[in-house]
Amino acid sequence: MRAQRFMAWLAGLSLVLALAACQTEKPLPEQRFDLRGKVVAVNKNEGTVTLAHEAIPGYMAAMTMDYPLKDKWAFDVLKPGQTITATLVVASDRAWLEGIVVTETAKPESNSLAPPESARPILGEEVPDFPLANQDGKRIHLHQYHGQALLLTFIYTRCPLPDYCPRMSKNFAKILEEVRRDPKLSPSTHLLSISIDPEYDKPAVLRTYGLNCAGNTNPFDHWDFASGTPEQVRKVAEFFGLKYWSEEGQIVHALVTALIGPDGKVVKLYRGNDWQPGDVLADLRTLPRGGARNQPVQGPGLRKTTQ
Ligand SMILES: [Cu+2]
């Protein structure tokens, strides 16, 4: 999937290059750029390194992305938190990093760049009545979904990494499609995407993003996009064990999606981005419906947390 992310970027880049090259028939020469950034993750199996890098003036904004490495030795040397310089080589159909130099070792606290998995929340724990504001600027609060199954996740609309927030939103869109088709699920299932970028993700931004995610059909009867004050969002995220912080102009964050039963208690957690919409739909179908609070939750609540 990291390779896919890179290929998608490269496809976009190739298109830009192709458009730029319309007037000339000659193949494009390799382009080389100096790059400086911080190592976020070393993905030896995929042959890539995730780098939060500075902008390349006139070519590319600062971003966090996976790059293939030409120098295989680097996999044994690179560690999260290091600052490196490298040459980004862009050929007509691929790009890679070479000439890597570690310019700064990782600071001890930087080892936590990939946010650690949290033990929170405990399955079966009651979710507090957190207040937020939705895409219409209307105040919402989590207890208003009692009686329904609530699937909740955290995103931010400017997230540049296709397999992070955009994937969560795509998964939610697929789940919503299926929920709408299922007369048993449809009346008692709600989705909620909470932005961890409340300063930017104001209601109007969330509304546009939501419409986009749902392929321009109105999703808001079943799917709210919420934010709030930074403190409000921080409290919800803390409850669900989600850590996030700003770095190099982006938000570094883990992913956690939670299924909350009609009784308002945590039924299941889906961490990371490997879960499939089908997993969640299967869990949704085993949940008791009918809305009575304090009714014992059967089914997936008894199973272990998805990693
Ligand atoms: Cu993201």
Image: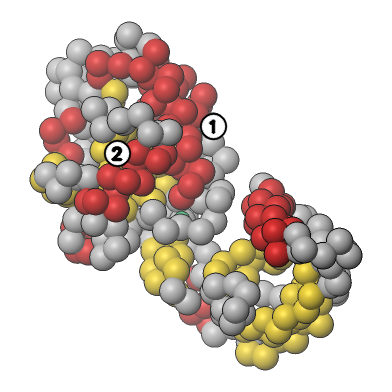
Taking the spot 39% from the left edge, 26% from the top edge, the residue there is 176
> Quick one: which residue is furthest to the front in this view?
23
- Give 165 or 297, whichever is nearer the viewer: 165
How far across and how far down the image is residue 151, in percent?
33, 33
**Quadrant position of residue 267:** top left
- Give 37 or 136, whichever is nearer the viewer: 136
How far across and how far down the image is residue 169, in percent?
43, 41
How far across and how far down the image is residue 126, in percent?
21, 38
Mark 1 vs mark 2, CA separation in Å? 17 Å
Residue matched to label 2: 192
Residue matched to label 1: 276
What colouring style does the render use? secondary structure
Specify whether residue 35 is in view.
yes
Left/right placement of residue 166 relative to residue 141 reads right
Kind of residue indicated by mark 1: Gln
How far across and how far down the image is residue 278, in percent?
51, 24
Taking the spot 38% from the left edge, 61% from the top edge, the residue there is 243
> Quick one: which residue is furthest to the right in this view?
26
Specify whether residue 6 is in view.
no
Q: Residues within 10 Å of mark 1 (few under 14, many from 20)?
A: some
